Image (cartoon, helix red, strand yellow):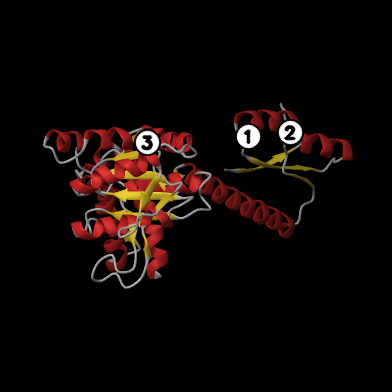
Amino acid sequence: HDIVLLDLKMKGIDGIETLQQLKKKSPDTYILMMTAYGTVETAVKAMKLGAADFLLKPISPDTLEYKLSHISQFIKLRTENEQMRQDLSNSFHNIIGKSKIMKNVFELISSVADARSTVLITGPSGTGKEMVARAIHYLSNRQAGSFIKLNCAALPENLVEAELFGYEKGAFTDAKKMTRGRFELADGGTLLLDEISEMPSNLQAKLLRVIQEREFERIGSSETIAVDVRLVATSNRNLKEYIAQGKFREDLYFRLNVIPIVLPPLNERLEDIPLLVNHFIEKYNKENKKAIEGIDNDAMSLLISYHWPGNVRELENLIERAVVTSASKILNED
C-alpha cells in the first residue's frame, strides 16, 4: 500500500481529478492532498473522494513527518489485520488448509456438526482425524457436553469392554469400586472411538446394540443405562477389506458410516504445505521461546517435492525439530 502526496493545483490536470483516478485504480492507496489555496469546501470534497488528509502549504517537515508516520502505522496495522483474517479463513478449528479438498472437508464438518448421526472419519495416519472429530464436537449443539476419546488399539482386548461400559464393584478381581465407562462419561456429548478397526470382535455386537438402542449395562450389573451420545469413529484401515476378511461386522460398518468424512494424504494437498509450515513455526516458536522468522525458498521447494508418508504429523515433527535446533532465523535445507 503506497502513500501519495498530491498537490491540488497542477498543470494540465487538477488534484481532485487525479485523486478520483488514483482511488479508482488503487482504492487502498493513501493520498495526502496539499495546497496553498485551501477552502473548507475543497477539503471536504477531497476527503469525501477518499483523501486521507488535507494539508495547507507551507507544510513544516515535522508536520509532514508526523502525518506520514501516522499513516504508515495505520497501514501496518491494517496489513496485520488482513493477514490475521487470511490466516483465520485458512484455519478451521486448528485444521489448516486452503486447498479445495480441505475446504470441502470444512464445509462438510459444518453441515453435519449438529446432527446426531454417527460419523466415520477415514484417512491415512497423521492426516488429522482426531482434530476433525474435535471440530465436529465443538461446532455442534453438544459443545457444552464432554468430548471423550477411547483408542481401541491402545488397550488390551479384555480392558476395552470395561473402558467402554464401566463396571460394578466386584465385577472382576481388580474392580475395587463402581466405575463409569466412556459411554456414561460422554452422555450429552461426543464419544470418539479412535482406530475402530481394532475393536475386538466380541465387542462389535455390543457396540452395535448401543448405537441402535442407546442403552447398555455396566459389567456385573443388570441395570440398563440410557445415554444420549454422538458417536464418531476413525480408521486408517480399509474397513471394507476387514469386512471381507471377517474382522469387522458389516452391519456395524453401515451403522458407523452414516456420514463419511475422508481425509486426504498430505501429498494430495501440496498447496497447503506453506500454510502448515508457517503455522507450525509460529506454534513451536511460542512453545520454545524461539524467534524463527520463516523458511527459505530452497527448503520450501524440498518440502513440497517430498512424498510425506507420515502426512501432516510428519511435517509437524520436522518443523518442531527444525525450530528447536536451528541457529539461523530462517530455516534452510541444512
Kindly identify the amino acid type of the residue bearing the numbered disc 2.
Gly
Front in this rendered view, residue 62 or 124: 124
Label 1 SS: loop
Q: Nearer the viewer, residue 92 or 207?
A: 207
Q: CA distance from mark 2 to mark 3?
A: 44 Å
Task: Locate residue 70: give its quadrant.
Answer: bottom right
At which x and y percent is residue 330?
33, 59
User: What is the residue that sits farthest to the front in this orientation?
Assistant: 222
Residue highlighted by disc 1 = 27
Q: Give the SS element for disc 2.
A: helix
Contact? badges 2 and 1 (CB < 8 Å)? no
Which is more N-terminal, label 1 or label 2? 2
Q: Amino acid at mark 1?
A: Pro
The quadrant of the picture occupied by the N terminus is top right
Q: Residue furthest bottom?
A: 176
- Horizontally, is 276 left or right of 78 in the view? left
Q: Residues within 10 Å of mark 3 (few under 14, many from 20)?
A: some
Residue 99, numbered label = 3
Residue 327 seen by the camera: no
